[in-house]
Amino acid sequence: MKKKIVVIPCSGIGKAYGEIGRQAVYELIEDLRTGDVATTCLARLMIDDPDAKALIRDNPVITVDGCAKDCARKNVEFTGKKVDGAFRVIEVFKENRDLKPQGILNLGEDGFKLVHILARRLDEEITGLMRKEP
């Protein structure tokens, strides 16, 4: 069976950067990399769900964190898996300071521009990882 790249966003509920990260992963899975990418809920790793752990154990993993706490990366690594790529939404924002998310429930036009930028960066990272996979 062909491996998938697993992209796990942080939970970041109630935070604009967490929402940007999640939306970028959805865009990646639904529009840019249909069939190549999978995800799972971070909470499933936190409760030691065997299916979630098997998914990350058997596939390359990229994490997307909304802040410097790196909860997604840390929870993946807590399972014993080394991440193959780690992104922070805040870094994308720092490079695009003119784009300010409107809010949490409604990211607004600027917020969705950040989503698209991050989704494209994730897509580029996946292209690199797929080249490395046998």
Image (tube, rainbow, N blue to C red):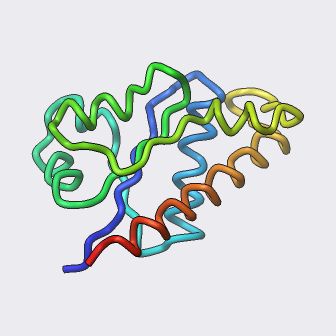
Q: Which of these two is toward me, 46 or 133?
A: 133
Residue 46 against residue 30 in the figure, above or below: above
Q: Where is residue 12 in the image (x, y as percent from the top left)?
A: 50, 27
Q: Which residue is drawn at 76% across and 39% down?
A: 111
Question: 43 or 55: which is nearer to us?
Answer: 55
Q: Is residue 31 above or below residue 75?
A: below
Q: Residue furthest front?
A: 132
Coordinates of residue 41 in the picture (x, y in percent): 34, 42
Which residue, as the protein is rendered here, is positioned at the far left?
Answer: 50
Indicate the quadrant containing the C terminus: top left, top right, bottom left or bottom right.
Answer: bottom left
Q: Which of 104 and 115 is in front in this view?
A: 115
> Where, quadrant-wise, is the N terminus in this rendering?
bottom left
Q: Residue 32, position in %: x, y?
A: 58, 70
Who is closer to the viewer here, 89 or 47? 89
| 125 relative position to 92: left or right | left
Residue drawn at the location 59% of the way across and 50% of the way down: 24
- Residue 94 falls in image quadrant: top right
Residue 5 is drawn in which quadrant? Answer: bottom left
Residue at x-position 39% and y-position 45%:
8
Asked if residue 47 is positioned above or below residue 116 in the image, the reply reads: above
**Farthest right residue?**
98
Residue at coordinates 24% horizontally, 38% vertically from top-left?
44
Q: Count the marks: how many?
A: 0
